[in-house]
Image (spheres, grey):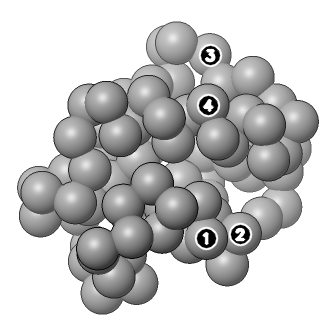
């Protein structure tokens, strides 16, 4: 998951994402950050995350992001 953490740190370097269990509720990511995150994950892993999968629960924690990537055949 370190690659995902690196992407998150590039988007919002002021936060320590490894200490949060809900990035959205904790105010670490807003909707624009999620759009940026989707784009960066697409580029980094060579995938295309479908609009139907862009839900807060998929991006609110490292576990959620990891599970989503696994659905796309990626092992981060």
Circle 4 residue: 39
Task: Pick whichever of labels 3 and 4 is earlier in the sequence.
Answer: 4
* SS for callout 2: helix
User: Measured along the vertical axis of the image, is residue 40 above or below residue 39?
Assistant: below
- Considering every residue shown, the one lying at the far top of the view is 51
Circle 3 residue: 50
Assess whether mark 4 and mark 1 are in contact (beta carbons under 8 angstroms): no
Circle 2 residue: 3
Spatial CA span between label 1 and label 4? 14 Å
- Residue located 67% across and 78% down the image: 2
Task: Pick whichever of labels 1 and 4 is earlier in the sequence.
Answer: 1
Report if residue 64 is visible in the image: no
Task: Pick whichever of labels 3 and 2 is earlier in the sequence.
Answer: 2
Circle 1 residue: 6
* SS for callout 4: helix
Q: Position of residue 55 (x, y in %)?
A: 36, 29
Q: Position of residue 52 (x, y in %)?
A: 49, 13
Task: Pick whichever of labels 3 and 1 is earlier in the sequence.
Answer: 1
Q: Residues within 10 Å of mark 3 (few under 14, many from 20)?
A: few
> In the rendered image, which quarter is residue 25 located in?
bottom left
- The quarter of the picture where the N terminus appears is bottom right
* SS for callout 3: loop
């Amino acid at each position: 998951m370190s690659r995902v953490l690196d992407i998150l740190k590039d988007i919002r370097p002021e936060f320590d994402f490894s200490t949060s269990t809900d990035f959205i509720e904790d105010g670490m990511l807003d909707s624009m950050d999620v759009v940026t995150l989707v784009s960066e994950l697409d580029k980094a892993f060579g995938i295309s995350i479908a609009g139907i999968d862009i839900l807060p629960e998929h991006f609110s924690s490292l576990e959620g992001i990891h599970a989503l990537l696994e659905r796309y055949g990626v092992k981060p």
